[in-house]
Image (cartoon, rainbow, N blue to C red):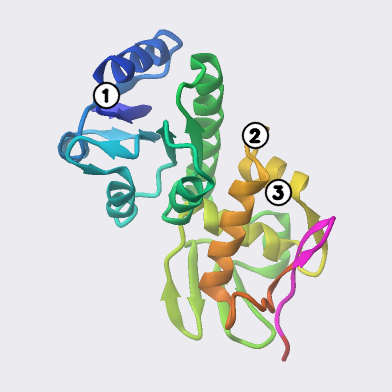
Amino acid sequence: MQYQCMIVDDEKLLADSTAEYLNLFGVKTAAAYSAAKCRAFFQEHTAELLLLDINLEDGSGFELCKELRETTDIPILFISARNSDDDKLIALHIGGDDYIEKPYSLSVLLAKVTVMLKRYRQYTKTSGETLASDQDSEQGNCYVSADRRLEVRFDTRQLFVEGVPVKLTALEFKLLAYLIRQENRVVSKRELFDEVWKDRFTGDGTLNVHIRRLREAIERQPGKPEYILTVWGDGYQFCGGKE
C-alpha cells in the first residue's frame, strides 16, 4: 500500500493524533512506534515522506535514518523535543532534510509536510523524465569540471570524484546540480531556498549543513574549498576547478 507520509514516534498518542490530523487534510499517513515497526512497514508499504523522532523505544532515530538512507532518498523530517544545535546538525548531516522541535504546531507541520511532498514529487517526476533544464541542454547531460576531478551526470543523478562514484541524497544532488548550472555566478541563499528547497520554511542552518556535506563529498580539503566558495554576505559560487 502506498502512503504519502509515515510517522515514527514512540509517543503513541502524539503519533496517532498527528497522523489523524494529516489524514483529515488529505495526507494519507500511517504511524509506527518503534524502529522495528518502521522497518516492517517499509517491507510491505511505501511512503513519500518520513517524520522521524530521535528517541525511540528500541533505538535511535539517527541510526534508523542512516540505515534508511542506504535504500531510499525520500525526504526525512526529524521531529524531536531535543533542541540543541548539535542534534539538529547531526540530523541534517546524516541525511535528514529538515528538523522541527516538539511541541510542534500541527498547522505548521501540515504546511511543511505539504511543501516537502510537493517538492519530492516534482523532483522524482523530473528525474524520471530528465534532470536537464534549458541550461542542461547547453551543457549536455554530463558536467566535467575544468580539472577533470568531478563528473556529474544529470540524467542519472550520479556524481564521480576522480572516477569514484560518490553517493548523495536527492536534495544534495539537486543543490549541487543547481550550483553547477549557475557556474561562476554568485547565488544568494534566498535563491537556493526558492529554487532548490522551494519553500519558505528552510533556514540558514539547513543550507549550511548541506553545503558542508557537498564540500566533504567533492573537495580535496573541505575546509579550504576550491569548487563551492562562500561569498560572505551574498551566498555561494561554484567554480569548476583549475585546469
Using a 10 Å C-alpha cutoff, classify the residue at mark 1 as few (fewer than 14 neighbours), some (14 to 19) or many (20 or more).
many
Circle 1 SS class: strand
Q: Mark 3: which amino acid?
A: Leu
Mark with earlier residue (1, 3): 1
Rendered image: mark on residue 234: none
**In the drawing, does residue 33 fall left or right of residue 50?**
left
Asked whether the viewer can see residue 154, the reply is no
Tell me which residue sits at (67%, 76%) in the image: 225
Q: Amino acid at mark 1?
A: Ala
In primary-sequence order, the first of circles 2 and 3 is 3
Magenta span of residues: 230-241
* Residue bearing the label numbered 1: 31
Return the residue at label 2: 199
Say which of 172 and 53 sits in front.
53
Q: Can you say which quadrant of the picture contains the C terminus?
A: bottom right
The residue shown at (67%, 54%) is 133
Q: Amino acid at mark 2?
A: Asp
Q: Which residue is mark 3?
A: 192
